[in-house]
Image (cartoon, rainbow, N blue to C red):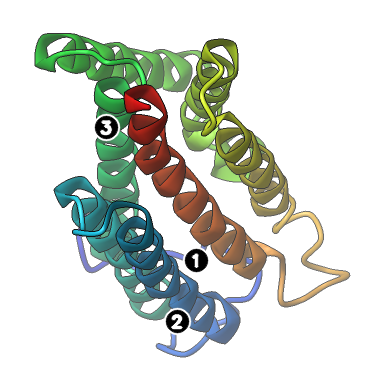
Amino acid sequence: MDPWAKIDLYCERTDASFWAEPLNAVTNLAFPLAAALIVRRARSEHGALPWDASVLAALAALVGAGSFLFHTFATVWGRWLDLGFIAAFIYVLLARFLARAADLRWPGVLLGLVLYAALERGVLAAVPRGALGGSIVYLPALLTLGGCAAFAWKRGDRAASRFGAALAVFAVALALRTIDGPVCEAWPVGTHFVWHLLVAWTLYLGATAVLTARRAAAS
């Protein structure tokens, strides 16, 4: 596939120009804001900034950068960056959940990541990639976030409510992403820009839930 080929996926874009998706582009500022809030909360709770908080905050900011590039250049390479940074955040968040909340050593963490990758491949193999307006690619993340919330709740971890909030926000975000195309005629700007705002909130909630989980296990 030509990395420079143009892609038109969302309601707001009506031509191939750089600024054809202003709302979809500008709302990516929510991601560096989420990154700053992750750092602020981690410092307030831990004193010194934990290394994994730094990594999660950096990845949250990169998610915004990748999404901004995609919604402005609207190219295949922009799409790769968009999806790649989101995937990196998901895998790092899951790895830290398994290490912090589930108290697994690195072999167990790696096994958990392999199982998640298998879930991703299984879902995409069973359901067409374009299902639900392309939102099907995020279904494994939603299911896994639900599993994290259930695990934390069953364990009595004080991070459980934050995981539950992340799950609820992400579910609404996916619904709004899915209806972007169907509502286009009635609402020309679409709903994808709200997806950005809610996903940034989800990243903040998910990251701070994981960072809180270790304190709960240690207390």
Query: Residue sitting at 45 percent across and 79 percent down?
Result: 29
Alpha carbon separation for disc pair 3 and 1: 35 Å
Nearest the camera: 5 or 111? Answer: 111
Q: Residues within 10 Å of mark 2 (few under 14, many from 20)?
A: some
Residue 95 in sight in this render? yes
Q: Which residue is mark 1?
A: 8
Q: Which residue is mark 3?
A: 96
Nearest the camera: 9 or 180? Answer: 180
Under tag 2, what secondary structure? loop
Question: Which x, y percent locates residue 123?
Answer: 47, 18
- Indicate the amino acid at tag 3: Arg
Image quadrant holding the C terminus, namely top left
Q: Are marks 1 and 2 in contact (CB under 8 Å)?
A: yes
Q: Residues within 10 Å of mark 3 (few under 14, many from 20)?
A: many
Q: Is residue 137 positioned above or below 33 on the image?
A: above
Q: Is residue 138 positioned above or below 195 on the image?
A: above
Alpha carbon separation for disc pair 2 and 3: 39 Å
Q: Considering only order in the chain, which callout, 3 or 2, is on the residue closer to the N terminus?
A: 2
Q: Which mark is residue 16?
A: 2
Q: Quadrant of residue 180?
A: bottom right
- Indicate the amino acid at tag 1: Asp
Q: Considering only order in the chain, which callout, 1 or 3, is on the residue closer to the N terminus?
A: 1
Under tag 3, what secondary structure? helix
Nearest the camera: 17 or 140? Answer: 140
Q: Nearer the viewer, mark 2 or mark 3?
A: 3
Q: Nearer the viewer, mark 3 or mark 1?
A: 3
